[in-house]
Amino acid sequence: MSSSQPLLELENVVKHFPVRGGILNRVVSRVHAVNGVTLSVARGETLGIVGESGCGKSTLGKCIVQLHRATSGAVRYEGTDLTQLGHGELMPFRRKLQMIFQDPYSSLNPRQTVGALLAEVIRFHSIVPRAEESLFIDELIQKVGLRPESRDKYPHEFSGGQRQRIGIARALAVKPDFLVADEPVSALDVSIQAQVLNLLMDLRDELGLTLIFISHDLKVVEHFCDRVAVLYLGHVVEELSSDELHATARHPYTRALLGANPINDPTERRELAVLEGDVPSPYDPPPGCPFTTRCPLVEDVCHTAMPPLVDHGGGARVACYAVDAPSEVRPAREAGASSAG
Amino acid sequence: MQERTPILEVRNLSTSFRTDRGVVTAVDDVSFDLFRGETLGIVGESGCGKTVTSKSILRLLPEHLSFHSPESRVMFEGRNLAKLSERQMRSVRGDRIAMIFQEPMTSLNPVFKIGWQLDEALRYHTDLDRSARRRRAEEMLDLVEMPNAKERLDEYPHQLSGGMRQRVMIAMALCCEPDILIADEPTTALDVTIQAQILRLMENLKRELDTAIILITHDLGVVAQVADRVLVMYAGRVIEEGTVFDLFRAPRHPYTKALLDSIPRAGNRRRGQRLATIPGIVPNLFELPAGCRFQDRCLHVEERCRTEEPAHLAHGDETHPARCHFPLDHA
Amino acid sequence: MWRRILGSRGVSKFRRDKFALVSLAVIVVYLGAAIAVALGAISRDETFARVGPNSLVGFFETPTVEQRIAYTDFYIDQVRTAGERGDDALRALDVYGLEPRFSEAEAALAVVEPLFERFEAVAIASEGDDGLDAAGLARLSEVEREARTLWVEPSGWQGTKRALSLQLGTDRQGRSILLRALYSIKVAAQIGLVAALFSVVIGTALGGAAAYFGGVVDHAIVWLYSTFSAIPYIVLLMVLASMFLGSPVENTLIPVYVAFCMTFWIGPCRVIRGEVMKLRELEYVQAATTLGFGRMRILLRHVLPNTLHLMFINFSLLFIGAIKAEVILSFLGLGVKDQPSWGVMIKEAGQEVIGGFFWQIGAATFFMFVLVLAFNVLSDALQDAFDPKHVG
């Protein structure tokens, strides 16, 4: 995977939000939402981005589709740095990069019927000639698994899962190559989650889409994605293939996430791995590695500087001083596996 | 477990709402027992009636909009809670049966200090004096493993994180040592690592205080982790009931089975493998079909399911009844 | 479209609310009256025309002897004075359709003079310490009846119109209170409509722009409305209205419109700004951005249409607000001029009230009260029926 030319490359992307205050409305502090993320996604690949609330995963997704403009760093799509483009120059890329949103209730304009919503997008970008528009809309509606008569209905007439399908249809209307799905199933019931995930999988295979899938749910990401990047307070702390997530995860935070997830089987009931404390505030992150406040393996060196992402082979990268160097990867793998139990 | 007498007996509980479109029955003929020291999980998707069930027990629903059927009985210590006066009910709520809610952000009053809010509960339900109440409040925060309990008493809710607020809620719920704790989606709004903390806390408290817990959740993982027995609800009905082991190992109702199958399994992945889904959506409570409420989504539906609603039957196993004409056989 | 709206849950809930339906009917009647007046059913001149004696009481009050004498004096005196001036004056005499029976002055005076002497005798007798005895009252009734025979009642439509115009009595200049109160409906509706419409449009445009574009635009607009709202509202209204004193448009409604729009836009501006701030963070707006839509397109097509319900609520609040504010301004002499309005009527009724005559102030207040009440009930009901939080 890493050998092919990446479709999307993030290089040291930083996003800080200024916090204004006082009577002069000056910038009094900054929220460090994304702190230097470097990632790449190959064509046809699905990258999962996992983390807890406030880790910057949504902000990162919005920096990729240029809903937020990164404070610094580069977002390269097929070699073009999107952060340097103006509104007009971005237009061709708007068609290629699309986003699916989390909340099925606020992500659709309540005053547009499904047909009107899709027609607006299609006309704006002249996706198909006017004569074929109606046919194309029917195709889209059918592709996301809605009934043809949905065309003339308003969003409030649909259930949450159906609305999410409409959101997917809207993203697909511009025939994109690349999708950022920001928690697309988190707001849905379990049985509906599976329907939407299946739809996304089918569309991915049918249309050859490249995806970034943002979620807090490790189980869903593991099932859906090829690779997983784990975010903690705006830093990528680990990146690895999801095939053997449980076996190869090395970073103590990833291990804690895996351990804290209840298993769907009472016979495998275990003491949940409990991390003490809370995620530190992104207004005032601790110096060094942000995980020091909760890390069971913390050492003195951790407080001095953020550990670099070290390549551990097989596409795995870990940012932790306490994890063994790549030369000792093999034994470390077994050690990791045994501590999972 | 079966020899003991239940601490709470719910029988034929039905709760209906008056709406613009007529009367709708959100909880329909629900019966179950709760024993001391056990955790009963109630699972189901949104709109299945699990939250209404818990609120009906404590009568927290607006009285001008909702009503119980006359057969509804909620027996607690020999009294039928469904028939108590509002005044009598107040001495049960909080003191004997406590409840914690999903949203820790909005269940605490933002203008009062944590200590004041704990103190208020103690003042209402106990006759301790001021300093004793303060000590008790501090003990409670210690009990819920709140770091720096003493200082926290003088902080406001906005100074605490979501997980800590949920701890305060639990402390408030437990400060009168209730017999029953109803937890309505207590971890849904929390991150997994914080969820793990709260679940562990609830386990420890159950062990220490011998409290009976009703845990309402949509998350089967949470149920598998902490519940002893489980009720599965669908469209206002209990459709399956059993010990957590029976239910997860050998679900009898096709809905339970489908629900379990639709969750991606951790550490057991094949890329591109489709998840098992339940087709369609939950029926509208205003337009319930004749017969089984799951018929339109069931893979095993037969003619009888469309005409006759199945009873909640044991099918030979008294501890594991299911509301299905053709329960799945795992023998 | 219409079928969908009429069949919706909100409408069916609304239709079950009896008070709301009555209010709606009341408002429709008012609107009908306003339109009829605007189309010329009652002309401005008619509201200034004499329709009868001064301070005539309305339909259910029995006039006192003193009032009866005053009214009879009017009917005799009009003919007598015109007759003394000659044939032309007599022929020109017309009290809102009521004409003297005579076309020649000589004939008229021959009848009127003796009647006038008898009337004087009764009038003088009534001013005595004991007032009129039974015989005196009988004489008064007779004089009254004969005074009316000096006149020819108009027939047909004009007769009806005249009879109606006297139902609520007359003011101190003999003008019909009913006609003036009815004409005021048009003035009120006109002021309410224009003031509310422009205020909502201005407020929405500014509020939407402030919230959506943010930065300097937001600061400027917030500064503007903070400054305006720091000045007491009545003072601001008075200052704005008095700015036009002496200008060519002084006697039109334009000063009133300007004063209201400049004070009223603040309310909708605030509300719409808040709502747009909320809406612009919603995911469908973000989705529109990722689709490459421009900012004006998003603002006009995706954001502002979703504030429509707030525009309606603000419109109805301001409509009533303008009607009430008009009363205050007119009372202070800064509002409506050269035509009647409820405010003008209440102002003019000031002197009458001291004299114990309540028909003018009563009519103006009642007409306004019913409209305001109906509007309030209706807007509450509409909110209940259509607020998404209540529909559930």
Image: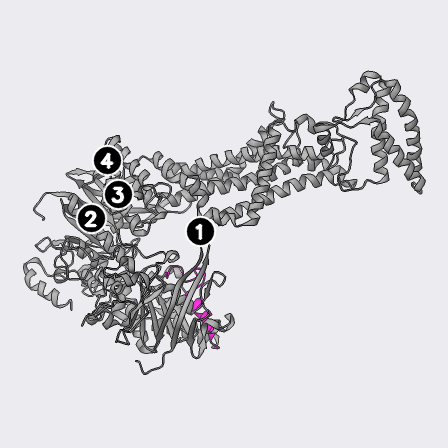
- Image disc number at residue A141: 3
Instruction: Report the residue at 61% width, 40% height from top.
Output: C324
Residue A269: give x, y in percent of width and height: 21, 71
Which SS class for mark 3? helix
Say whether marks 4 and 2 touch (CB < 8 Å): no
Membership of B117 in magenta stretch: yes
The type of residue carrying mark 3 is Ile
Membership of C130 in magenta stretch: no
Please identify, in this view, whether the residue under mark 1 or under mark 3 is nearer the observer.
3
Nearest the viewer among A319 and C312 is C312
Real-space CA distance between mark 4 and mark 2, rounded to the nearest whole angstrom: 19 Å
Q: Is residue C156 above or below residue B73?
A: above
Q: Which residues are magenta?
A: B103-127
Q: Quadrant of residue B297?
A: bottom left
Please rate how many residues cluster around mark 4, counting C-alpha atoms within 10 Å: few if below 14, some from 14 to 19, many from 20.
Answer: some
Real-space CA distance between mark 3 and mark 2, rounded to the nearest whole angstrom: 23 Å
Residue ID for mark 1 = C391
- Image disc number at residue A90: 4
Chain name for mark 1: C
Please identify, in this view, whether the residue under mark 1 or under mark 4 is nearer the observer.
1
Same chain, labels 4 and 3: yes
Same chain, labels 1 and 4: no
Left/right placement of residue C139 relative to residue A56 reads right
User: Do we see residue C214 in this rendering?
Assistant: no
